[in-house]
Image: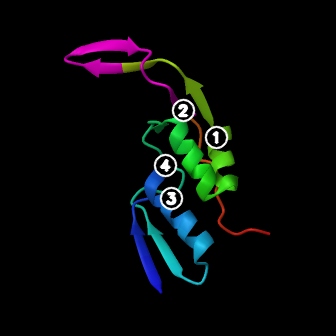
Amino acid sequence: MKIACVGGGPAGLYFTLLLKLRAPQHDITLFERELPGATRGWGVVFWRDLLEKLYSADPRSACAIEQASFGGDEALVFFHGVWRVTDQMKALNLKGKPKPKLKPRRG
C-alpha cells in the first residue's frame, strides 16, 4: 500500500515512524515544505502522560525524545494582553536543538 503523509511536524513524523514500525511493507512518503534541517524556532510542549503513551507505543523513540527534552514547572503565557508566569503547567519541552534522529529500522 502507498501512504502519503503531509507535514513533517511532530505528529507527521511520529505517525510515519509508528506506521513504518508496525507495517514495514507499506511504501510511506512524508511530504514537508521546508528544507531538511529547517526550523521555525519554536518548541513542542507535552505533558508526562503523553510521554508515557509514547513509551507504550515505541520505547526506543520515546527515550530519544525524552533525552532531547527538558522539564519545567513554570510557563510564560500571554493572556488577555499580559505576559504571566504560571506554575500550573508541568511540561516537557524539546530543547532548542535539531530534532532527534528517529530511524524506524531496527538492527
Q: Which residue is mark 3?
A: 13
Contact (Cβ within 8 Å) of mark 1 with mark 2: yes
Residue 55 spot, x, y in % from top left: 63, 50
Disc 2 and disc 3: Cα gap in Å? 18 Å
Looking at the magenta stretch, what is its main secondary structure?
strand
**Residue pictured at 74% horizontal, 68% vertical:** 106
Could you tell me which secondary element the residue under label 2 belongs to? strand
Q: Earlier in the sequence, mark 2 or mark 4?
A: 4
How far, Cα to Cα, is label 1 from label 2?
8 Å
Q: Which residue is mark 2?
A: 92
Residue identified by numbered label 4: 38
- Spot occupied by residue 27 in the image (x, y as percentages of width and height): 52, 82
**Magenta stretch encompasses residue 91:** yes
Q: Residue placed farthest to the right in the image?
A: 107
Q: Kindly identify the amino acid type of the residue bearing the numbered disc 1.
A: Glu
Instruction: Please report contact status of discs 2 and 3: CB closer than 8 Å, yes or no.
Output: no
Distance of mark 1 from mark 3, alpha carbons? Answer: 16 Å
Which residue in the rendered view is the most extreme toward the bottom?
Answer: 1
Q: CA distance from mark 2 to mark 4?
A: 22 Å
Q: Is residue 9 visible?
A: no
Q: Which residues are magenta?
A: 77-95
Relative to residue 11, is residue 17 drawn left or right? right
Residue drawn at point x = 54 percent, y = 70 percent = 19
Q: Earlier in the sequence, mark 4 or mark 1?
A: 4
The answer to whether marks 3 and 4 mark residues whose Cβ atoms lie closer than 8 Å is no
Q: Tell me what residue is drawn at x 59 percent, y 73 percent.
A: 22
Tag shown at residue 4: none
- Type of amino acid at the residue the image marks with label 4: Ala
Location of mark 1 (residue): 66
Sort mark 2 into few (<14), some (14-19) or many (20+) by Cα contacts within 10 Å.
many
Residue 100 vs residue 87, the one in the foreground: 87
